[in-house]
Image: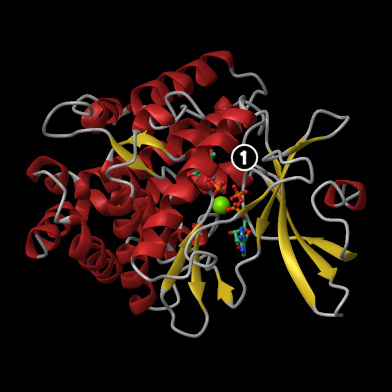
């Protein structure tokens, strides 16, 4: 663990730094909860994050994106009578007014207000929570519908360009950098048999029927803070990938993670399936807001978008496994392969359930 004290004092100095602990289960950034004591003896926490600059090549542009989006959201939240400190992230600038601190080792650090009395889930606790998540992600897209996309840089170019993700998988198979190809023939075959699916959303995106929206691009269940008291999704976090994208991919990413009956890295595949019940509650919550602005084509692509997003994620895990685990954080051997397998199991299950998924969407339009 890096030494935190010299970093936190770049942001806060009057209050007493007490301690920090690694926090959350993100695969990309390093997150710490940092505890302080004020002169009046009250104790409070902040979130400190080291931005993964191997993944995000332009941390300065990224922080400008986040600041722009959160300030914009704060105005809308205030106008609606909401709590601007809880319903979106608050960036704490450094003492010299920067949105991040660049340390001597070239690491970029940022600080956020810790939104207290909230919880994040790795798997869904109950259907009602997931309805609330659907509502919150729909509301997030709605609030940002008139955000000027020219203000956003693409923090990861072609992030959800599924066709290019597929090409990256092909390269990884061809290069077989760490000699793992022979052990994953089945998974490679599974992916290659579905190559034509990769273009399903991306080839339509940018057309009148499927416009670019300001999307979150990483709508996992653990990227929404749920209020412990009300159970409502209160604050959408992990805004690193807010960029123009496909509405159906945001919907789909929530489904692939939150509607799964098991964790993303479950090794017993018998436990992994896509719950139609969870799909339905999420669709109901999301569409109660999003049906106002979605085009017919976008709405009709929500079910297929869920499958493609799950497929893409599986491809990404497999690619990273074949490249020697250089992108996603892993906590055990073959972790990325285990993750890939759950995603492919979900894809298969969604293929079986596709007609039902489509009719559920129609029901709430
Ligand atoms: P990563 O990009 O690595 O996924 P996140 O920004 O999603 O990082 O943060 C990781 C975890 O830290 C979240 O899932 C959440 O539990 C917690 N977290 C992040 N920001 C806050 C915040 N402002 N208040 C409370 N908890 C937070
Ligand atoms: C990463 O940062 P985190 O853990 O919320 C990844 C997502 C993947 C997800 C899979 C910037 O999300 O794209 O869908 O892992 N984020 C980035 O769990 O690559
Ligand atoms: Mg996250």
Image: 351 above or below 107: below
Observer able to see residue 190 = no
Q: Quadrant of residue 307?
A: top left
Q: How many marks?
A: 1
Q: Residue at x 65, y 19 (%)?
A: 177
Q: Position of residue 336 (x, y in %)?
A: 59, 42
Q: Position of residue 53 (x, y in %)?
A: 68, 30
Residue named by callout 1: 328
Q: In the visual, does 60 lie left or right of 312?
A: right
In the displayed structure image, the side of residue 138 where residue 363 appears, left or right: left
Above or below, comparing residue 207 to residue 142 in the picture: above
What sort of colour scheme is used for the picture?
A: secondary structure
The residue carrying mark 1 has its beta carbon less than 8 Å from ligand 2:
yes
Q: Is residue 100 left or right of residue 350?
A: right
Within-10-Å neighbours for mark 1: few <14, some 14–19, many 20+:
some
Question: Compared to 140, does 154 lie above or below?
Answer: above
* Position of residue 155 measured from the top left corner of the image (x, y, whole percent): 51, 30
Residue 300 at x, y percent in the picture:
12, 46
The quadrant the C terminus occupies is: bottom left
Locate residue 222 relative to residue 303 in the image: left or right.
right
Q: Secondary structure at mark 1?
A: loop
> Which of the two residues, 136 or 356, is positioned nearer the viewer here?
136
Which quadrant of the figure has residue 274? bottom left
Answer yes or no: is residue 93 visible. Answer: yes
């Amino acid at each position: 663990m890096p030494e935190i004290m010299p970093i936190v004092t770049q942001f806060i100095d009057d209050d007493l730094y007490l301690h920090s602990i690694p926090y959350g289960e993100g695969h990309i950034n390093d997150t710490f909860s940092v505890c302080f004591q004020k002169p009046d003896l009250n104790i409070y926490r902040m979130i400190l994050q080291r931005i993964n600059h191997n993944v995000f090549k332009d941390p300065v542009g990224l922080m400008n994106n986040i600041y722009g989006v959160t300030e914009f959201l704060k105005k809308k939240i205030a106008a609606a009578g909401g709590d601007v400190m809880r319903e979106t992230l608050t960036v704490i600038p450094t003492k010299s007014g920067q949105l991040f601190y660049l340390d001597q080792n070239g690491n970029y650090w940022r600080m956020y207000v810790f939104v207290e009395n909230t919880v994040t889930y790795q798997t869904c606790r109950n259907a009602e929570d997931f309805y609330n998540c659907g509502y919150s992600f729909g509301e997030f897209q709605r609030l940002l519908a008139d955000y000027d996309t020219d203000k956003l840089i693409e923090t990861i170019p072609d992030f959800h360009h599924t066709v290019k993700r597929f090409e990256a998988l092909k390269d990884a198979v061809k290069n077989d950098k760490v000699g793992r190809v022979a052990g994953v023939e089945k998974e490679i075959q599974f992916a290659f048999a579905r190559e034509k699916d990769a273009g399903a959303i991306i080839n339509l995106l940018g057309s009148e029927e499927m416009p670019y929206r300001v999307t979150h691009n990483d709508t996992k269940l653990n990227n929404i803070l749920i209020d412990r008291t009300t159970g409502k999704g209160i604050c959408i976090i992990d805004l690193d990938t807010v960029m123009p994208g496909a509405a159906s991919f945001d919907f789909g990413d929530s489904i692939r993670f939150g509607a799964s009956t098991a964790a993303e890295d479950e090794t017993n595949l018998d436990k992994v399936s896509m719950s139609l019940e969870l799909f339905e509650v999420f669709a109901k919550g999301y569409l109660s807001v999003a049906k106002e602005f979605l085009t017919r084509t976008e709405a009709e692509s929500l079910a297929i978008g869920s499958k493609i997003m799950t497929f893409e994620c599986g491809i990404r895990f497999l690619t990273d496994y074949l490249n020697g685990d250089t992108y996603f954080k892993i906590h055990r051997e073959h972790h990325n392969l285990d993750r890939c397998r759950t995603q492919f199991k979900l894809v298969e299950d969604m293929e079986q359930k596709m007609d039902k998924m489509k009719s559920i969407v129609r029901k709430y339009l």
